[in-house]
Image: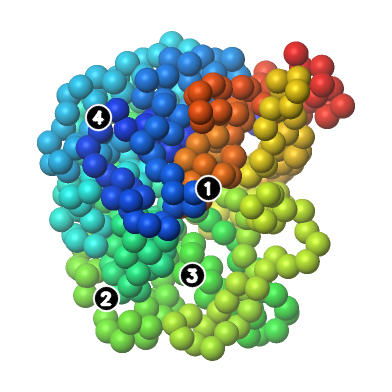
Amino acid sequence: MSFPDGFLWGAGTSAYQIEGHHGRGESVWDVFCRRPGAVEGGGDGSRACDSFVRWREDVELVKELGLGAYRFSTGWSRVMPDGAHADPKALDHYERFTDALLEAGAEPVLTLNHWDMPASLTWAERSSVNAFTSYAQAVADRLADRVTWWITQNEPWIIALLGYQLGLHAPGVADLGTAVKAGHHVLLGHGAAADVLHAFPGTKAGAALSLFPCDPATGSAADRAAARGSDGYVNRWYLDPLLGDGYPADMREHWERALGHGLDFVRDGDEAAIGGRSDFLGVNYYTRRVMAAAPPDPFPWKVVGPSGDVARTDEGWEINPGALRDLLVGLSRRFPGTPLMITENGGVFGDTPTHDGRVHDDRRIAYLRDHVAAVESAIEAGADVRGYLHWSLMDNFEWALGYRPRFGLVHVDYATGARTVKDSGRYYARLIAGGGQAPALPRIEAFG
Ligand code: FCB
Protein backbone atom coordinates (compact mmCIF):
# COMPACT_ATOMS: atom_id res chain seq x y z
CA MET A 1 0.00 0.00 0.00
CA SER A 2 1.23 3.45 -0.87
CA PHE A 3 -0.81 5.52 1.55
CA PRO A 4 1.53 7.10 4.12
CA ASP A 5 1.14 6.60 7.86
CA GLY A 6 -1.35 9.06 9.29
CA PHE A 7 -3.16 9.45 5.94
CA LEU A 8 -6.53 10.99 6.77
CA TRP A 9 -9.55 9.10 5.45
CA GLY A 10 -12.69 11.10 5.85
CA ALA A 11 -15.70 12.91 4.45
CA GLY A 12 -17.00 16.45 4.46
CA THR A 13 -20.07 18.67 4.81
CA SER A 14 -20.67 22.38 5.38
CA ALA A 15 -22.81 24.30 7.86
CA TYR A 16 -25.37 25.90 5.55
CA GLN A 17 -25.85 22.66 3.64
CA ILE A 18 -26.71 20.51 6.67
CA GLU A 19 -27.43 22.43 9.87
CA GLY A 20 -30.80 24.13 9.42
CA HIS A 21 -31.52 27.60 10.74
CA HIS A 22 -31.95 27.17 14.52
CA GLY A 23 -31.24 30.76 15.51
CA ARG A 24 -28.30 31.56 13.29
CA GLY A 25 -27.97 35.09 11.90
CA GLU A 26 -29.14 35.87 8.40
CA SER A 27 -26.60 34.81 5.80
CA VAL A 28 -26.21 35.84 2.17
CA TRP A 29 -27.69 32.45 1.27
CA ASP A 30 -30.88 33.08 3.28
CA VAL A 31 -31.37 36.28 1.31
CA PHE A 32 -30.48 34.70 -2.05
CA CYS A 33 -32.83 31.73 -1.56
CA ARG A 34 -35.77 34.14 -1.28
CA ARG A 35 -35.24 35.34 -4.86
CA PRO A 36 -37.88 33.72 -7.01
CA GLY A 37 -36.27 31.05 -9.20
CA ALA A 38 -32.86 31.28 -7.55
CA VAL A 39 -32.97 27.73 -6.17
CA GLU A 40 -34.26 24.73 -8.04
CA GLY A 41 -37.43 23.52 -6.34
CA GLY A 42 -37.56 26.73 -4.30
CA GLY A 43 -35.74 25.21 -1.31
CA ASP A 44 -33.43 26.82 1.20
CA GLY A 45 -31.24 25.84 4.14
CA SER A 46 -33.79 26.54 6.86
CA ARG A 47 -34.13 22.86 7.72
CA ALA A 48 -31.62 20.93 5.55
CA CYS A 49 -30.46 17.81 7.45
CA ASP A 50 -31.27 19.40 10.81
CA SER A 51 -27.71 18.71 11.88
CA PHE A 52 -27.61 21.59 14.35
CA VAL A 53 -30.03 19.49 16.42
CA ARG A 54 -29.09 15.98 15.25
CA TRP A 55 -25.31 16.46 15.44
CA ARG A 56 -24.82 13.56 17.81
CA GLU A 57 -26.26 11.25 15.16
CA ASP A 58 -23.81 12.68 12.64
CA VAL A 59 -20.90 11.95 14.96
CA GLU A 60 -22.26 8.40 15.37
CA LEU A 61 -22.18 8.07 11.57
CA VAL A 62 -18.58 9.25 11.49
CA LYS A 63 -17.81 6.57 14.06
CA GLU A 64 -19.79 3.88 12.29
CA LEU A 65 -17.93 4.51 9.05
CA GLY A 66 -14.61 4.56 10.90
CA LEU A 67 -13.69 7.96 9.47
CA GLY A 68 -10.33 9.22 10.68
CA ALA A 69 -11.26 12.77 9.72
CA TYR A 70 -14.38 14.87 9.29
CA ARG A 71 -14.50 18.15 7.42
CA PHE A 72 -17.20 20.54 8.60
CA SER A 73 -17.59 24.29 8.64
CA THR A 74 -18.43 26.62 11.46
CA GLY A 75 -21.36 28.73 10.29
CA TRP A 76 -19.99 32.24 9.85
CA SER A 77 -23.49 33.70 10.16
CA ARG A 78 -24.08 31.59 13.27
CA VAL A 79 -20.86 32.57 15.00
CA MET A 80 -21.14 36.24 13.99
CA PRO A 81 -24.84 36.91 13.35
CA ASP A 82 -24.33 40.64 12.71
CA GLY A 83 -20.99 40.15 10.94
CA ALA A 84 -19.07 41.82 13.78
CA HIS A 85 -19.72 40.26 17.18
CA ALA A 86 -19.26 36.62 18.14
CA ASP A 87 -22.09 34.71 19.79
CA PRO A 88 -20.55 32.61 22.56
CA LYS A 89 -23.45 30.12 22.44
CA ALA A 90 -22.64 29.31 18.83
CA LEU A 91 -19.01 28.74 19.76
CA ASP A 92 -20.15 26.50 22.66
CA HIS A 93 -21.94 24.37 20.10
CA TYR A 94 -18.89 23.98 17.87
CA GLU A 95 -16.73 23.27 20.89
CA ARG A 96 -19.03 20.43 21.95
CA PHE A 97 -19.14 19.14 18.40
CA THR A 98 -15.34 19.21 18.02
CA ASP A 99 -14.86 17.42 21.33
CA ALA A 100 -17.33 14.73 20.28
CA LEU A 101 -15.46 14.21 17.01
CA LEU A 102 -12.14 13.89 18.80
CA GLU A 103 -13.69 11.43 21.21
CA ALA A 104 -14.94 9.44 18.21
CA GLY A 105 -11.37 9.27 16.91
CA ALA A 106 -11.92 11.65 14.01
CA GLU A 107 -9.57 14.50 13.23
CA PRO A 108 -11.61 17.71 12.77
CA VAL A 109 -10.89 19.56 9.50
CA LEU A 110 -12.53 22.92 10.07
CA THR A 111 -13.59 25.25 7.25
CA LEU A 112 -14.07 28.88 8.21
CA ASN A 113 -15.84 30.16 5.09
CA HIS A 114 -18.03 27.65 3.34
CA TRP A 115 -20.12 30.43 1.80
CA ASP A 116 -22.62 31.35 4.54
CA MET A 117 -21.28 34.86 5.00
CA PRO A 118 -23.41 37.14 7.23
CA ALA A 119 -25.90 39.06 5.11
CA SER A 120 -24.45 42.40 6.22
CA LEU A 121 -21.13 41.62 4.48
CA THR A 122 -19.97 41.26 0.88
CA TRP A 123 -16.65 40.20 -0.68
CA ALA A 124 -17.12 43.09 -3.10
CA GLU A 125 -15.88 45.35 -0.27
CA ARG A 126 -12.37 45.21 1.08
CA SER A 127 -13.74 45.62 4.62
CA SER A 128 -14.91 41.99 4.36
CA VAL A 129 -11.29 40.96 4.95
CA ASN A 130 -11.30 42.56 8.41
CA ALA A 131 -14.66 41.04 9.24
CA PHE A 132 -13.39 37.61 8.21
CA THR A 133 -10.23 38.10 10.28
CA SER A 134 -12.26 38.85 13.44
CA TYR A 135 -14.39 35.79 12.78
CA ALA A 136 -11.28 33.61 12.28
CA GLN A 137 -9.90 35.00 15.54
CA ALA A 138 -13.10 34.21 17.46
CA VAL A 139 -13.19 30.60 16.22
CA ALA A 140 -9.45 30.09 16.68
CA ASP A 141 -9.56 31.46 20.25
CA ARG A 142 -11.99 28.68 21.07
CA LEU A 143 -10.79 25.78 18.97
CA ALA A 144 -7.19 26.19 17.84
CA ASP A 145 -6.00 24.32 20.93
CA ARG A 146 -7.64 21.16 19.57
CA VAL A 147 -8.12 21.57 15.82
CA THR A 148 -5.00 21.08 13.70
CA TRP A 149 -6.38 21.31 10.15
CA TRP A 150 -8.03 24.59 9.11
CA ILE A 151 -9.45 25.51 5.73
CA THR A 152 -9.71 29.27 5.49
CA GLN A 153 -11.67 29.69 2.24
CA ASN A 154 -13.66 27.14 0.27
CA GLU A 155 -13.37 27.50 -3.52
CA PRO A 156 -12.44 31.15 -4.15
CA TRP A 157 -13.04 30.73 -7.91
CA ILE A 158 -16.57 29.40 -7.39
CA ILE A 159 -17.36 32.25 -4.98
CA ALA A 160 -16.19 34.80 -7.57
CA LEU A 161 -17.69 33.03 -10.58
CA LEU A 162 -21.10 31.96 -9.34
CA GLY A 163 -21.58 34.57 -6.63
CA TYR A 164 -20.32 37.74 -8.35
CA GLN A 165 -19.79 37.08 -12.07
CA LEU A 166 -22.83 35.02 -13.06
CA GLY A 167 -25.15 35.71 -10.14
CA LEU A 168 -26.08 32.04 -9.81
CA HIS A 169 -25.04 31.78 -6.15
CA ALA A 170 -25.34 34.21 -3.25
CA PRO A 171 -25.12 37.15 -3.25
CA GLY A 172 -26.36 36.98 -6.86
CA VAL A 173 -24.21 39.73 -8.36
CA ALA A 174 -23.52 39.52 -12.12
CA ASP A 175 -20.60 41.83 -12.88
CA LEU A 176 -17.19 40.77 -14.15
CA GLY A 177 -15.19 43.55 -12.51
CA THR A 178 -16.86 42.96 -9.15
CA ALA A 179 -16.09 39.25 -9.48
CA VAL A 180 -12.36 39.80 -9.97
CA LYS A 181 -12.29 42.22 -7.05
CA ALA A 182 -14.29 39.88 -4.80
CA GLY A 183 -11.93 37.00 -5.64
CA HIS A 184 -8.99 39.16 -4.57
CA HIS A 185 -10.63 39.94 -1.23
CA VAL A 186 -11.32 36.24 -0.67
CA LEU A 187 -7.60 35.53 -1.15
CA LEU A 188 -6.65 38.39 1.18
CA GLY A 189 -9.03 36.82 3.68
CA HIS A 190 -7.10 33.57 3.39
CA GLY A 191 -3.83 35.34 4.14
CA ALA A 192 -5.22 37.23 7.11
CA ALA A 193 -6.93 34.15 8.59
CA ALA A 194 -3.77 32.07 8.13
CA ASP A 195 -1.86 34.72 10.10
CA VAL A 196 -4.44 34.51 12.88
CA LEU A 197 -4.16 30.71 12.96
CA HIS A 198 -0.37 30.66 12.94
CA ALA A 199 -0.32 32.43 16.28
CA PHE A 200 -1.54 29.09 17.69
CA PRO A 201 1.17 26.43 17.76
CA GLY A 202 0.58 23.33 15.66
CA THR A 203 -2.23 24.63 13.44
CA LYS A 204 -2.12 24.02 9.70
CA ALA A 205 -3.88 26.52 7.43
CA GLY A 206 -4.81 26.07 3.80
CA ALA A 207 -7.45 27.09 1.29
CA ALA A 208 -9.54 24.55 -0.63
CA LEU A 209 -9.52 25.27 -4.36
CA SER A 210 -11.91 23.88 -6.94
CA LEU A 211 -9.34 22.68 -9.46
CA PHE A 212 -10.46 21.73 -12.96
CA PRO A 213 -7.78 20.33 -15.26
CA CYS A 214 -8.22 22.03 -18.66
CA ASP A 215 -7.51 20.00 -21.80
CA PRO A 216 -7.54 21.29 -25.40
CA ALA A 217 -10.31 19.91 -27.64
CA THR A 218 -7.81 19.37 -30.49
CA GLY A 219 -4.06 19.59 -30.93
CA SER A 220 -4.34 22.97 -32.69
CA ALA A 221 -2.26 25.83 -31.32
CA ALA A 222 -5.47 27.87 -30.85
CA ASP A 223 -7.15 25.19 -28.72
CA ARG A 224 -3.99 24.64 -26.74
CA ALA A 225 -3.87 28.37 -26.01
CA ALA A 226 -7.55 28.23 -25.02
CA ALA A 227 -6.82 25.43 -22.54
CA ARG A 228 -3.91 27.39 -21.10
CA GLY A 229 -6.08 30.51 -20.78
CA SER A 230 -8.86 28.58 -19.11
CA ASP A 231 -6.32 27.05 -16.71
CA GLY A 232 -5.22 30.59 -15.87
CA TYR A 233 -8.78 31.72 -15.23
CA VAL A 234 -9.89 28.74 -13.15
CA ASN A 235 -6.75 27.42 -11.47
CA ARG A 236 -3.58 29.49 -11.76
CA TRP A 237 -5.22 32.81 -10.82
CA TYR A 238 -5.73 31.34 -7.33
CA LEU A 239 -2.94 28.77 -7.02
CA ASP A 240 -0.08 31.07 -7.95
CA PRO A 241 -0.72 33.87 -5.44
CA LEU A 242 -1.63 31.41 -2.68
CA LEU A 243 1.54 29.46 -3.13
CA GLY A 244 3.77 32.50 -3.29
CA ASP A 245 4.24 33.29 -6.99
CA GLY A 246 1.87 36.28 -7.15
CA TYR A 247 -0.83 36.71 -9.79
CA PRO A 248 0.18 35.19 -13.16
CA ALA A 249 1.13 37.90 -15.67
CA ASP A 250 -0.84 36.43 -18.60
CA MET A 251 -4.09 36.47 -16.61
CA ARG A 252 -3.46 39.89 -15.19
CA GLU A 253 -3.13 41.18 -18.75
CA HIS A 254 -6.27 39.29 -19.67
CA TRP A 255 -8.27 40.96 -16.89
CA GLU A 256 -6.93 44.40 -17.70
CA ARG A 257 -7.97 43.91 -21.33
CA ALA A 258 -11.36 42.42 -20.50
CA LEU A 259 -12.20 45.08 -17.89
CA GLY A 260 -10.62 47.98 -19.76
CA HIS A 261 -8.73 49.17 -16.67
CA GLY A 262 -5.97 48.18 -14.29
CA LEU A 263 -6.58 46.08 -11.17
CA ASP A 264 -6.32 49.02 -8.79
CA PHE A 265 -7.87 46.98 -5.99
CA VAL A 266 -4.67 44.89 -5.87
CA ARG A 267 -2.59 47.18 -3.69
CA ASP A 268 1.14 47.12 -3.00
CA GLY A 269 1.88 44.38 -0.51
CA ASP A 270 -1.32 42.44 -1.17
CA GLU A 271 0.34 39.54 -2.96
CA ALA A 272 2.89 39.27 -0.16
CA ALA A 273 -0.03 39.11 2.31
CA ILE A 274 -1.62 36.20 0.42
CA GLY A 275 1.36 34.02 -0.43
CA GLY A 276 3.66 31.93 1.73
CA ARG A 277 1.03 31.13 4.33
CA SER A 278 -0.32 27.76 3.22
CA ASP A 279 0.71 24.74 5.22
CA PHE A 280 -1.17 22.58 2.74
CA LEU A 281 -3.37 22.94 -0.30
CA GLY A 282 -6.94 21.64 -0.27
CA VAL A 283 -7.90 20.09 -3.61
CA ASN A 284 -11.58 19.86 -4.53
CA TYR A 285 -11.78 17.71 -7.64
CA TYR A 286 -14.91 16.73 -9.51
CA THR A 287 -14.21 16.78 -13.25
CA ARG A 288 -12.17 18.42 -16.03
CA ARG A 289 -12.88 20.98 -18.76
CA VAL A 290 -12.25 20.50 -22.47
CA MET A 291 -11.55 23.83 -24.15
CA ALA A 292 -11.61 25.37 -27.61
CA ALA A 293 -10.70 28.81 -28.94
CA ALA A 294 -13.55 31.34 -29.10
CA PRO A 295 -14.12 34.99 -30.08
CA PRO A 296 -12.25 37.10 -27.53
CA ASP A 297 -15.11 38.72 -25.60
CA PRO A 298 -14.87 38.48 -22.65
CA PHE A 299 -12.89 35.21 -22.77
CA PRO A 300 -10.99 33.84 -25.78
CA TRP A 301 -11.92 30.26 -24.83
CA LYS A 302 -15.03 28.20 -24.29
CA VAL A 303 -15.94 24.87 -22.71
CA VAL A 304 -16.81 22.32 -25.41
CA GLY A 305 -16.61 19.09 -23.50
CA PRO A 306 -16.05 16.44 -22.44
CA SER A 307 -18.47 15.46 -25.17
CA GLY A 308 -19.74 12.11 -26.38
CA ASP A 309 -19.92 8.77 -24.75
CA VAL A 310 -17.92 9.14 -21.54
CA ALA A 311 -18.86 7.90 -18.06
CA ARG A 312 -20.93 10.54 -16.27
CA THR A 313 -22.59 11.16 -12.93
CA ASP A 314 -26.34 11.82 -12.78
CA GLU A 315 -25.50 15.53 -13.05
CA GLY A 316 -23.77 14.90 -16.40
CA TRP A 317 -20.23 15.54 -15.11
CA GLU A 318 -17.58 13.36 -16.72
CA ILE A 319 -16.08 10.79 -14.34
CA ASN A 320 -12.32 10.95 -14.90
CA PRO A 321 -10.09 9.66 -12.10
CA GLY A 322 -7.01 9.76 -14.36
CA ALA A 323 -7.28 13.55 -14.48
CA LEU A 324 -7.16 13.61 -10.65
CA ARG A 325 -3.98 11.55 -10.67
CA ASP A 326 -2.29 13.87 -13.18
CA LEU A 327 -3.52 16.95 -11.32
CA LEU A 328 -1.99 15.76 -8.02
CA VAL A 329 1.31 14.78 -9.61
CA GLY A 330 1.47 18.11 -11.47
CA LEU A 331 0.74 20.13 -8.30
CA SER A 332 3.40 18.36 -6.28
CA ARG A 333 5.96 18.98 -9.06
CA ARG A 334 5.01 22.63 -9.41
CA PHE A 335 4.78 23.37 -5.68
CA PRO A 336 7.22 21.01 -3.94
CA GLY A 337 7.00 21.28 -0.18
CA THR A 338 3.26 22.00 -0.18
CA PRO A 339 1.37 18.90 0.99
CA LEU A 340 -1.95 18.22 -0.69
CA MET A 341 -5.22 17.12 0.87
CA ILE A 342 -8.20 16.04 -1.21
CA THR A 343 -10.81 18.16 0.53
CA GLU A 344 -13.69 17.23 -1.82
CA ASN A 345 -14.31 14.51 -4.39
CA GLY A 346 -17.58 12.83 -5.15
CA GLY A 347 -20.48 12.53 -7.52
CA VAL A 348 -24.24 12.83 -7.85
CA PHE A 349 -25.87 9.41 -7.96
CA GLY A 350 -29.55 9.63 -7.21
CA ASP A 351 -30.11 6.19 -5.67
CA THR A 352 -32.66 6.06 -2.86
CA PRO A 353 -33.70 3.24 -0.49
CA THR A 354 -35.19 0.16 -2.17
CA HIS A 355 -37.73 -2.29 -0.69
CA ASP A 356 -35.00 -3.85 1.51
CA GLY A 357 -34.38 -0.44 3.09
CA ARG A 358 -30.87 -0.30 1.61
CA VAL A 359 -29.41 2.15 -0.88
CA HIS A 360 -27.55 0.22 -3.58
CA ASP A 361 -25.45 3.01 -5.01
CA ASP A 362 -23.01 0.82 -6.90
CA ARG A 363 -21.91 3.64 -9.19
CA ARG A 364 -20.75 5.70 -6.20
CA ILE A 365 -18.80 2.66 -4.99
CA ALA A 366 -17.07 2.41 -8.35
CA TYR A 367 -16.44 6.17 -8.35
CA LEU A 368 -14.90 6.01 -4.88
CA ARG A 369 -12.78 2.95 -5.68
CA ASP A 370 -11.43 4.49 -8.89
CA HIS A 371 -10.64 7.91 -7.40
CA VAL A 372 -8.93 6.38 -4.36
CA ALA A 373 -6.87 4.26 -6.78
CA ALA A 374 -5.98 7.45 -8.69
CA VAL A 375 -4.80 9.07 -5.44
CA GLU A 376 -2.70 6.00 -4.66
CA SER A 377 -1.15 6.05 -8.10
CA ALA A 378 -0.39 9.78 -7.75
CA ILE A 379 1.37 9.08 -4.43
CA GLU A 380 3.41 6.33 -6.11
CA ALA A 381 4.41 8.87 -8.76
CA GLY A 382 5.67 11.28 -6.08
CA ALA A 383 2.64 13.40 -5.13
CA ASP A 384 2.59 14.40 -1.45
CA VAL A 385 -1.04 13.68 -0.54
CA ARG A 386 -1.99 13.60 3.14
CA GLY A 387 -5.69 12.80 3.07
CA TYR A 388 -8.84 12.03 1.12
CA LEU A 389 -12.13 13.58 2.22
CA HIS A 390 -15.10 12.38 0.23
CA TRP A 391 -17.90 14.80 -0.60
CA SER A 392 -20.18 14.25 1.16
CA LEU A 393 -20.84 12.41 4.40
CA MET A 394 -24.54 12.80 3.70
CA ASP A 395 -27.01 14.09 1.12
CA ASN A 396 -27.60 17.79 1.67
CA PHE A 397 -28.67 21.17 0.31
CA GLU A 398 -26.77 21.49 -2.96
CA TRP A 399 -26.93 25.29 -3.22
CA ALA A 400 -28.80 26.59 -6.30
CA LEU A 401 -29.65 23.00 -7.28
CA GLY A 402 -31.64 22.54 -4.09
CA TYR A 403 -32.18 19.05 -2.66
CA ARG A 404 -32.27 17.11 -5.95
CA PRO A 405 -28.59 16.14 -6.38
CA ARG A 406 -27.51 13.50 -3.85
CA PHE A 407 -23.78 13.39 -3.08
CA GLY A 408 -23.89 11.46 0.21
CA LEU A 409 -22.37 8.26 1.53
CA VAL A 410 -25.42 8.44 3.79
CA HIS A 411 -28.95 8.95 2.49
CA VAL A 412 -31.10 11.61 4.15
CA ASP A 413 -34.89 11.51 4.07
CA TYR A 414 -35.59 15.24 4.14
CA ALA A 415 -39.17 14.78 5.39
CA THR A 416 -38.10 12.94 8.54
CA GLY A 417 -34.38 13.67 8.76
CA ALA A 418 -33.71 9.92 8.91
CA ARG A 419 -30.19 8.90 7.89
CA THR A 420 -29.45 5.58 6.13
CA VAL A 421 -25.90 4.48 5.40
CA LYS A 422 -25.70 3.69 1.68
CA ASP A 423 -23.80 0.71 0.31
CA SER A 424 -21.05 3.18 -0.64
CA GLY A 425 -20.76 4.16 3.02
CA ARG A 426 -20.32 0.53 4.01
CA TYR A 427 -17.81 0.05 1.22
CA TYR A 428 -15.84 3.11 2.33
CA ALA A 429 -15.78 1.80 5.91
CA ARG A 430 -14.19 -1.43 4.65
CA LEU A 431 -11.75 0.45 2.48
CA ILE A 432 -10.67 2.62 5.43
CA ALA A 433 -10.35 -0.37 7.74
CA GLY A 434 -8.04 -1.93 5.13
CA GLY A 435 -5.83 1.19 4.98
CA GLY A 436 -7.04 2.09 1.51
CA GLN A 437 -7.22 -1.43 0.13
CA ALA A 438 -10.30 -1.60 -2.12
CA PRO A 439 -12.68 -4.39 -1.11
CA ALA A 440 -13.72 -6.56 -4.07
CA LEU A 441 -16.96 -5.28 -5.59
CA PRO A 442 -18.86 -8.61 -5.62
CA ARG A 443 -18.73 -8.58 -1.83
CA ILE A 444 -20.78 -5.37 -1.62
CA GLU A 445 -23.94 -7.32 -0.86
CA ALA A 446 -22.28 -9.06 2.09
CA PHE A 447 -21.53 -5.86 4.01
CA GLY A 448 -24.35 -6.30 6.47
C1 FCB B 1 -18.42 22.24 -4.17
C2 FCB B 1 -18.84 22.85 -2.83
C3 FCB B 1 -19.62 21.90 -1.96
C4 FCB B 1 -20.59 21.08 -2.76
C5 FCB B 1 -19.88 20.39 -3.90
C6 FCB B 1 -20.74 19.46 -4.71
O1 FCB B 1 -18.33 23.26 -5.10
O2 FCB B 1 -17.70 23.25 -2.13
O3 FCB B 1 -20.25 22.65 -0.96
O4 FCB B 1 -21.61 21.87 -3.22
O5 FCB B 1 -19.29 21.35 -4.74
**Nearer the N terminus, badge 2 or badge 3?**
3
Label number found at residue 232: 3
Callout 3: 10 Å neighbours few (<14), some, many (20+)?
many
Label number found at residue 23: 4
Q: Secondary structure at mark 1?
A: strand
Callout 4: 10 Å neighbours few (<14), some, many (20+)?
few
Kind of residue indicated by mark 4: Gly
Callout 1: 10 Å neighbours few (<14), some, many (20+)?
many
> Residue sitting at 44 percent across and 82 percent down?
298
Q: Secondary structure at mark 2?
A: loop
Where's residue 166, x and y in %? Answer: 41, 67
Label number found at residue 446: none
Which color scheme did the rendering employ for the protein?
Answer: rainbow
Kind of residue indicated by mark 1: Asn
Q: CA distance from mark 2 to mark 4?
A: 39 Å
Label number found at residue 263: 2
> Residue sitting at 51 percent across and 14 percent down?
60
Above or below, 355 against 314 in this view is above
Where's residue 324, x and y in %? Answer: 65, 51
